Image (spheres, rainbow, N blue to C red):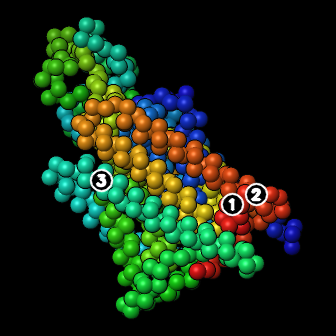
Amino acid sequence: MAQADRTKSTVKMLFWLLVSGGLVFYMVHTYRSGQMIHWYYYTASVDGYAVNARAFIDATPERPARLAIVPAAVIDGLQAVPVQAGGRLPRGANGVIAMRELEAGRRVALDSAANTISVMVPSEIKEQKGFKYKDTYKHKGIRTNPWAGLWNVAIVLGLGLSLGLLAEGITDFCGLKIEKLDHVIGH
Amino acid sequence: MFEFAIAGVTCPVFLLVLVGLTVGMVGGFIGVGGGYMVTPALIVFGFPGYMASGIDMTHIAGKGLVSTVRHRQLGNIDWTLALTMIAGTMLGVELGVRLLVYFKDLGISGVVLLMTSVVLMFSLFLYTQIETRRAHKRIAELEREGKGALREVQTSNLPRLFQHIPLAPIIRCRTARVIISMWVIVLVGMVTGILAGFLGVGGGFIRVPALVYVVGASTHVAVGTDLVEIVVSGAYGALRHSIEGNVDMMAVLFMVLGALLGAQVGSIATAYVRGPAIRYILSYSLILATLGAALRLIYVMTGQQIEWLSLAAVVLTLGEMIFLCLFISSLVWFAVRRRRGKWVPEWVVSLVM
């Protein structure tokens, strides 16, 4: 009987270790490869230019960053790809500089002759819940894949369940007796 | 350091694992999601406010499930109670959000929100403290009389009042050992849901006392059952935030991995303590959160001029997490010592099994 319990707990532990390990590997792999990010930064919600905001985080009015306007499928550094509202964002994009921002000309300016966009103020300080944080073009003008929301929930619930059952398997394997509690209430 | 490409933040992984671990431990022990602790911590680590809320809510769904699995094994979940309450909770959350929008339109949401938090949490703290002290004394009396006190002792008369409401259908919650009108449970879910939706929190710190003092469940069952509610509301919140683009799944992963250990310790620790010990920790958690909210309220009411108030609120919240973890660990340590027949302080005897 004891041997059968031991075998059962070993199988349980190994099974859930494989499942949770697989989920963790899948999450890390898709994140590292950029697949998750590509799914996340899915389509543009405004007309404008898709950019990788990280590339020009140090730009200032004195030393503006110049982004070359190129119709590319992948953004590489200081590049801006024209997109229309609802259009698929290129790989590597994490924000959109809206046309109205270019027309306002306060933080960015369009140089049609040189086919470039000059970014002068990529970030600003904002108050949010009493904390200061940088607000850049990142996350602006984008729409996420609605299925990504369901995917996130499914993954996090799958991960929670597999890790919970893995922990249960480990305690069973180690022979730690976890018994049901009695819930009689005294007064 | 890890570069979180979606959140656009570079942050040490161990900090996220540590937050997951501590909040997992506290949440597994008192049955709360811990949103009021995690969001300020993430903002301190550099995550934008909207991302902090999204990551927090998504991690709560995963962490809640880790704790739920263990509480199921401990027999702390009353599924009848949990499933009956979910309907009321969902309706309540929706009403709470609408109430918030109403106050927002009036332009007074921030102050009303913080004032409601402070008054509600302080009242809950007071009632829980007074009742738990009475229960603590009663256990000590029973111990002295050699009657071997039970795991749970409650001195509140409120549950008897609510259990006698003769409104059909009357349902039997076997694990909680409660026979009560279904409408009372639905109403508890709805009222706590309204408060949760209005205050923008998971609502565990309201629901656990409500399950104990209104429904009459034991504290252990209240904790386990509430975690089921937290998984459901966390999953719904995660879906909403993910669609809005407020979630970095890699940050969620690190926090859930931290919670794996923390939630186990917190959940298993409930087996070492009596109900009043959990209620004590819950009430301390409430008063510390109240202080944090009061500091933020003063900060808002003074026109956000006194910067140190905001910082003090964060420091208090982070300090609270560490304090509660140490408190829980010390209770388990004393329980183990007592089981081995070693000396433990007198005040601990009636709190541990």
Residue beneath the point at 34% across and 70% down = B191
Q: In this rendering, is residue B329 above or below A59?
A: below
Is A55 left or right of A120, judged from the image as shown? Answer: right
Q: Which residue is mark 2?
A: B344
Inspect the image, locate mark 3, and give the three-letter code of the amino acid beneath it. Met
Which residue is rendered at x = 29% and y = 26% of the image? A125
- Is residue A38 or residue A8 the one in the foreground? A8
Left or right: residue A115 versus residue B7 is left
User: Please, what secondary structure does the residue beneath circle 1 have?
Assistant: helix
* Residue B115, label in figure: 3
Nearer the viewer's eye, disc 2 or disc 3?
2
CB within 8 Å, label 1 to label 2: yes
Image quarter of the N terminus of chain B? top right
Height in image: B105 above or below B93? above
Classify mark 3: residues with Cα within 10 Å, few (<14), some (14-19) or many (20+): some
**Quadrant of the drawing holding the C terminus of chain B:** bottom right
